[in-house]
Each structure stands twice: as C-alpha cells, then as structure tokens.
Image: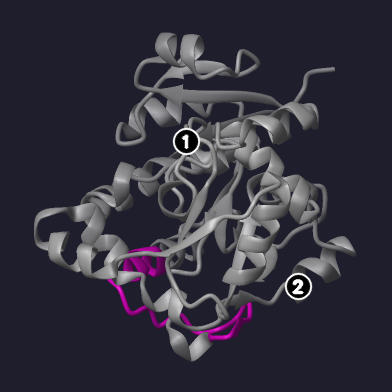
Amino acid sequence: MTRPLALVIGATGGIGGALADRLIADGWRVRAPHRDPDRARATRGRPHLDWVLGDALDQAAIVAAADGAEIVVHAVNPPGYRNWARLQAPMLASSIAAARAAGARLLFPGTVYNYGPDAFPRIAEDAPQRPLTRKGAIRARMEETLRTAGVPVLLVRAGDVFGPRAGASWFSQVLVPPGRPLTAVTYPGPLDVRHAWAFLPDVADAFVRLLGLPLPDIADFHLAGHALTGRELVAALETVADRSLAVRRLPWWALEACAPFNETFREMRELRYLWRRPVLLANDRLVAALGAEPRTPLAEALRATLAGQGSLPAPARLAA
C-alpha cells in the first residue's frame, strides 16, 4: 500500500521540521524542497525526508514538487524577519498554486501577530484581526488570501514557539540563546504577565491529528499551549537546569536605537505590545474536535528544547 505524500515547504525551519517528523511518524512520505538538496541531505539530520530541488519563490518548481501530494505545508518565512513585505506574498502564491495543482489541502501555521489588543487577553478563533504592525498586517492579508484561494486549508494558530529546532524564535533568539549552558534568561516583558507558548511537537501533533477528521474547506483552530507568566517560565527553567538563573530584561532601548539600521530589530520592536499584556489563545474549537489539546508536560518540553539547542548545563545533560 502506497503511503500518502506530503510536500513540506520550510522543512528546515522549526514548525516545518516538526511537522515533517510527525508526518513521517504517522506513516506519510515527506518531500522537502530546498535550494541545495544535497547540502540539506548532508547537514540537516533528516535522512527520512525526500529532499528535492526547489525554492519557495519559484512557483513552477514548487508546483512540480507537489505532484502526487495530498497535503502541502506552508511553513516558510523570510529569515531574520527580513523582507516580509516583498517575499511573503509570492511564497504563499507558490504554495497555493502547488495545492491547487495537486488537489491537496494546504496546512498553514498561524500566529498571534494578526491581532491587536482589542482581541486580548484570550483570543477567540473568530476574533477580528486588527493588527498594529506591518508584520501583523501581512499575516492578516495572507490568511485572507488563503480563505479566498479556492483550495482547502487547515490553519492552526499558536503562541510563541519553542522546541529542539525552533530556529528563529523569541525563545532561542532572546530568552535562551543556543550553544552555551543556561545561566540566565533575558525576558522581553513584565514577569507577571501571562503569555502563550507552544512546544513545536505539540503544534505538529495537533495538525496531524486534525487531518484525520472530516474538516470543512477552511478549517481554523487555536492551540492554547502553555500559558505562563515570566516568573513561571523562569521557575520551570530553573527546575530543568537544576540551578538558579539570573533574569535580565530585554533592553528595548537598544532595539529602538538600532532599528533604523537593522531590519530584524525594527520588526522585533514592533512586537513589543505582545509582551506588555496577557496574550492567550482560546482552544475551544480544537478541544471540541480532538477531545483534548496535545500538550507535552512543561518540564519535559523545556528539557528537550534545552538539550536540542545545546543549552543544558553539564550535570543536567548527564542526568537527562
């Protein structure tokens, strides 16, 4: 019996990689386009993927790569928050064209960037999208494009992600930089404000479990994840690391100063409002569909994340 085929665009990223792994575990074949498939095959540590030549901006190549696919995963973003306005629309157009040509459902990981403070603190699936930022406006336009594209869509929104291969995330870029033992946490907002976090394997698990259900053409869900204050997250990290951690505040003034000269800092600066107030996701629709949300225990998720990014102190790494 031939296993079903998934095309995962962005398999080298956090969500794309987690989805590729979860689909493989569920019996799917996964085809992954890359600008240099030989290098990806040699360096990315996922020999079970079928790496093929393809660039998300090359619509013809992505359509060709989708031949025979039952799902197309759009999990690609411009690196370092750069060139969102110029690159996101054509990349999404490639994924839509591929899904249309293959007769596939398009899977799209969503974010909270689409929402302004009027949707806080607990964002419902049908909350109005009134973004405050350029990035949020782009994400809202992307979702509107998906709703009118004429292809079936499965959209799952989650909070800030973390995981062993999270890539460009607030956790790995700001809170706990990879590659050195954890001794301190840099936190972007007030420590008593609750914030939504999502463990990447849980996001992937939700997508794959939802695929097993009868879905409408436009299926739209929220993953609540781990709703934590900064203090709770630091305490959990201290438990996993088995040591006290220094807590530093993100120097937003430095981002402000560098923003005119650095596009990544400029885009990060716009998202500060998401750290000043509670930002949570209502998962009522997901729970109604699945019975319960996939949610790895926090300590287990953090331990896997820290180990995966080389941040566990030596004694904890030996004990894990």
Q: Secondary structure at mark 1?
A: loop
Residue 22 within the segment the image draws in magenta: no
For disc 2, the marked residue is 285
**In the rendered image, is residue 243 in sight?**
yes
Q: Is residue 7 left or right of residue 84?
A: right
Q: Is residue 193 above or below residue 313?
A: below
Q: Is residue 254 left or right of residue 71?
A: left
Residue in view at x 69 percent, y 77 percent: 282
> Badge 1: how crowded within 10 Å, few (<14), some, or many (20+)?
many
- In magenta, the rendered stretch is 120-141
Q: Secondary structure at mark 2?
A: helix
Percent position of residue 180, x then y: 48, 34
Residue 10, numbered label: 1
Q: Amino acid at mark 1?
A: Gly
Depth check, front residue: 187 or 35: 187
Percent position of residue 251, x then y: 30, 66
In contact (CB < 8 Å): disc 1 and disc 2: no
| Sequence-first disc among 1 and 2 | 1
Residue at the bottom extreme, as displayed: 118
Q: Is residue 152 above or below residue 114?
A: above
Percent position of residue 123, x then y: 59, 80
Residue in view at x 21 percent, y 63 percent: 254
What whole-number distance in Å separates the C-alpha atoms at marks 1 and 2? 27 Å
